[in-house]
Image: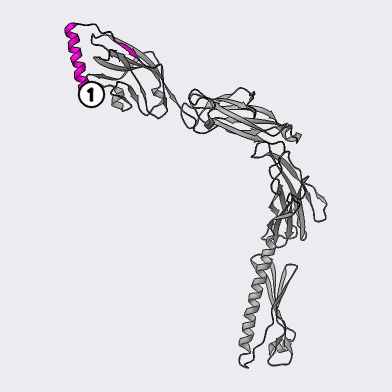
Amino acid sequence: MASTDGILSSFLIFITAIFKVALPVTVTTPEQVIIPLGGTGEIPCEFDPPYAMGIYWNRWDDAGGKEHVISRVGLDVTGSGFDSGNFNLTEDNALQIRYMQLKDEGRYECQVLDTNYEDDTSETQVIAIVTPETAPRITWSCGDQCISQHGPSSILNLTCTSDEAKPPVKLTWTNDQGTPIEAVPSRTREGTMLVGSSVTTSTIQYVIKRNNTLTCQAESEIIGKRSPEQRSTVQLYESVTPDEAPSVTTTCVNHCRTGIDVGTLLNLTCTSGEARPPIKLKWKNSHGSPIVTISSDVQVGSTVGTFVTTAVIQYTFKSNTTLTCQAAGLTGQMTIVQLNEMGIGTSAHRENLNGSNIDEGGFDLVMILLVAVAVAVGVVIILGIAVAVLYKKNKEYPVFQSPMFYLTNGRATVFSQEVASPTTERNLRITFEVTLTNPTSYDSETASETDSSTLAA
């Protein structure tokens, strides 16, 4: 097909030359072509009549001069752009730009030389664009006034930030009724990922008076208007109640050991869940008396319009005790801290909507004692086997009744009931006792019986 067009063009040129017929050429190109940064695009060039001696593509530089990019004369294609591989000519003489870069932006000219060796030109502006890949992001903040008011009329600063784009996008705010919200003048800064791109931010000040949904919309000539892909919403609530009881973390200040000893100084930090308005945290001791906090703070939560409260106390351990962190005004939302020489345990407590209690977490000391009991029972079984071997020579075997165990003040005691002695008429009782000082070891093992002389025998 290309060779046929070439033959036809050559024939017409030959006929024109013979009869010297004037065929003035008219060239047409689009005013603007948009090509994605890093992508490929084409600038069409149409001319009438559709016969030419040569097609030349030039680009205007910043100084106002022309730079030859690529041309076709007959079947030969030449030019610096063609040699670089970034430019090419299609079969219909359109200029193809590959791997679009910012330096490729500018004003391009299509020049057509007609059969009378007269020419005509047409220019096109080429623009590289960057389309936002994600919807705008909404963040929020507030100053001292926002936190200190502690009420639903607090002023929030909501900021909408666009993804990187070229040209810059326009951001607009609306409420749930579609009414525009006036924003402070938008700001634009250079993008960090793509050279030549821009990031736009728009901030509004909003007073929460009721539950409401706000929308931030990004618009531009490239992405159009009201595009769902470039829209973000935020839900604002007049009041928010934490779903969970406060959490407690512990930091040892001094006299720190594996366990807790008398004189150990602890920092206990109670942190509320996200709430609106901010909740107040109260510390109490085992007698219900208030404990003075050494610091308290209110920070914004991750959910727009919510706050997180922290309250810190210092406590010097003297004896086993229980401390409580209570979310004021929220019935049943509390966390109980148990301080014991064996360690620290927490138990979160809150009430369901129906009034029933829900306990969250657990106390690690219980698990420690259960493990100790299991170890003690195992030792008793081993002792029973040892006694059986001891009396095997007399072919009399002591009969153990079901072992019993009990827990007292962190001490696990396991003992068997009456054991028949094969050498005397008296009964023998063996007791095994484990005293825990930390979760991984115990202090002593003791065995006692009712008649030491019989046991020695």
Give the percent coordinates (x, y) of residue 155.
Answer: 71, 30
Badge 1 is on which residue? Answer: 2
Give above or below for 212 relative to 220. below
Q: Position of residue 412 (x, y in %)?
A: 71, 71
SS assignment at label 1: helix
Q: Residue at x 66, y 33 (%)?
A: 141
The number of discs equals 1
Q: Is residue 80 left or right of residue 451?
A: left
- Whether 132 is drawn above or below 456: the answer is above
In the rendered image, residue 215 lying in the magenta stretch gets the answer no
Residue nearest the observer in this picture, 322 or 29: 29
Q: Is residue 367 above or below residue 190?
A: below
Q: Is residue 84 visible?
A: yes
The colour scheme used here is one colour
Determine if residue 438 is in view. Answer: no
When asked about the image quadrant of residue 407, the answer is bottom right
In the image, 456: left or right of 130? Answer: right
In magenta, the rendered stretch is 1-28
Q: Residue at x 71, y 43 (%)?
A: 241
Q: Say which amino acid is labelled 1.
A: Ala
Q: Main secondary structure of the magenta part?
A: helix
Image check: 50 left or right of 311?
left
